Amino acid sequence: MIPGLSDEQLVTGAAHGDQDYWTVLYRRHQGRIYRFAFHMSGSHSIAEEATQETFLALLRQIGRYTPAKGTVAAYLLGIARFKVLRLLEQEPGHEELPALDPVAPVNPEEDLARGFQQEQLRRAIVALPDVYREALVLCELEGIDYAEAAASLGCPLGTIKSRVSRAKQLLLDRLAPAGTPQKGCLA
Amino acid sequence: MRNGEQHLEDGLRRLREADAGMEAPMAVEALVRREFMQRRRQHRVVRLLAWSGVAAAVVLAVALTARPSKSVSVEQPRAASPAAGTPVAPRRVELTTEFIPLQPAPADPDEFSQVIRVRLPRSELRRFGLAPFGQPLEGTVRADVVLGNDGRAQAVRFVY
């Protein structure tokens, strides 16, 4: 039963030319890769291209993957991160989310405002510096644990924790209603 | 936890839930699968070519060992180093092919007993796919044959 196989078994099968293994592997991970790329870029077109390039890159080097390089998920996210950042560099005029209005109030108690707040939050995340954005997206939006995020991003566990914490602080500063300075603000 | 932090945590949770079902368009899957099939076909062609080469080598080895040995005429081996004081003619560089194995390589290299220079019918070149296109195959061609201890030809190379 292919769907019950581990990621490593799927990679091995795909490396031997089994298309079913490759398809299951793709379907198991494409959503996470796409969401990661979208949250990183705020652009569906970049997310689409990054997802495609990530799996094509895996296909080109599938015979060289070993579990020593980390889990398949972490390995893929590592590739995706590189692809997204490269695409963002290459396409500065990509379809970005509208610019953030820093004076827009945040009021989570009001349901009518929720959609608006989500877009505000998305824009604020996309506006974060790369290192904070990728850590926040992986740990807070993809629910990946710190250890796996550290493997994906190639940095120590403590660094990931501090980057997530700092990213949240930056978001608080960015989303705070005008005239409401936050404690521990990172200028 | 401060109010602002709680609001942020709630916002992140709602965003995570809202995007949980987000997936890549089907067109991406189609492209990725097509690329996989293409690479698989390429690998199959490479494997087929490799196996064809092995099969051709086996056929050549069998054909040469089955060849009657009476068609071989052994040349006298060349003289050893010239005597001291004798003018030495400039050494002629021979152009040869690589040795083509006719038998599986023996585990012990000493099993090769000797190399002899022979003349083979030029038509033998054709067996090895070495016959120049459009050139006559009459006459003979020089070749070095490696003989094993059992007297069987182990490998051959042709001298141009």
Image: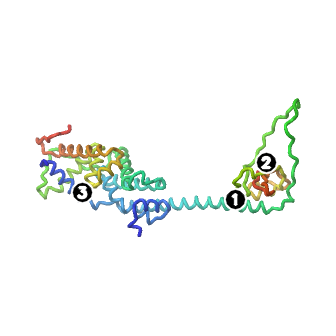
Q: What whole-number distance in Å separates the C-alpha atoms at marks 3 and 2?
A: 75 Å
A6 or A38, which lies in front? Answer: A6
Q: Which mark is residue B57?
A: 1
Q: Residue at x 76, y 44 (%)?
A: B95
On whether disc 1 and disc 3 are found on a single subunit, the reply is yes
First along the sequence among labels 1 and 2: 1
Mark number displayed over residue A75: none
Tell me the chain of label 1. Answer: B
Q: Is residue B9 above or below residue A19?
A: above
Residue that carries the numbered disc 2 in the rendered image: B159
> Is A171 situated left or right of B54 in this image?
left
| Parent chain of label 2 | B
Q: Please name the residue that numbered disc 3 is placed on.
A: B16
Q: Is residue B129 left or right of residue A148?
A: right
Which coloring applies here?
Answer: rainbow
Instruction: Bin the neighbour count of mark 2 within 10 Å (Cα to Cα): few under 14, some 14-19, many 20 and up.
Output: some
Is residue B67 depicted above or below B86 in this figure? below
Question: Mark 1: which secondary structure?
Answer: helix
Q: How many marks?
A: 3
